[in-house]
Amino acid sequence: MILKQLFDTKSSTYTYLIASANGREALVIDPVEENVNDYINLLKELDLKLVKVIDTHIHADHVTGASKLKSSTNCTTIMGENSPAETVDIKLKDEETIKIDQLQIKALYTPGHTSDSYSFLLNNCLFSGDTLLINGTGRTDFQNGSSEDAYNSLFNKLLKLPEDTILYPGHDYNGKKASTIGNEKKFNPRLQVESVDQYIEIMSNLNLSKPNKIETNIARNLKLGS
């Protein structure tokens, strides 16, 4: 299997390119608009045909490259069925599976960071978007976010996956590339709580500033970046 993890330095976003083998069909998760040419060059280098592009949710900190990739490659755009995006080709239900050659990727509805957040599971690899981060979790203070929903998504879904499941987050701000569910259960400070009320209290006191250009980014991402 081919798995390439690509990093956008401006927004600290991880983008993932996945394929079963050279010369095969490929999928991209969470592309960033400014890096579309880099993705296309990598696809050519690996002799891959991009057939699907997934956004885990409506992003607030960058503009998705989904629309540009569709224009360049005629790929299919995918999000979860709870997405308010207007021009998505396919909207997946919770636990619905999509196929790329021999690969099967399961959609997991994991709201909390936003009301439309999904994670995606491929074998023992979890692409968690902004729901579960390395030593952190996604903020819940805008885009219909909910700390209670986030707690349920984390503790009643993602953290019940096998502990050796590899975590590939949508962002990292400290140079970390991957973790495991087991490591996050043990060491992630946001997860060392005994109740949903404790988690809500932590998330209510983060006092984070909003991303730059949040209104513009969301408006464009509702149209997949076009």
Image (spheres, rainbow, N blue to C red):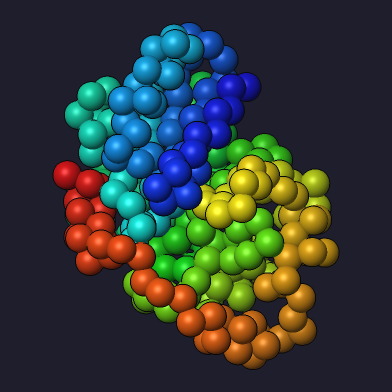
Q: Is residue 200 left or right of residue 23?
A: right
The count of marks equals 0
- Residue 171, horizontal then vertical, whole percent: 52, 52
Residue in the image at 50% along x and 34% along y: 6
- Taking the view exactly as shown, the residue that stands out farthest to the left is 226
- The C terminus lies in quadrant: top left
Whether residue 107 is visible, yes or no, is no
Q: Nearer the viewer, residue 94 or 167?
A: 167
Q: Percent x, y for residue 140?
A: 47, 75
- Residue at image position (61%, 58%) is 133
Q: Position of residue 12 (x, y in %)?
A: 47, 49
The quadrant the N terminus occupies is top right
Q: Which quarter of the picture shows residue 115?
A: bottom left
Q: Is residue 10 above or below residue 135?
A: above
Could you tell me if residue 4 is visible in this image?
Answer: yes
Q: Residue drawn at (60%, 60%), measured in percent from left and top?
A: 132
Q: Residue at x 73, y 71 (%)?
A: 189
- Give the vertical position of 85 relative to 17 (above or below): below
Residue 120, position as x, y percentages in the image:
54, 47
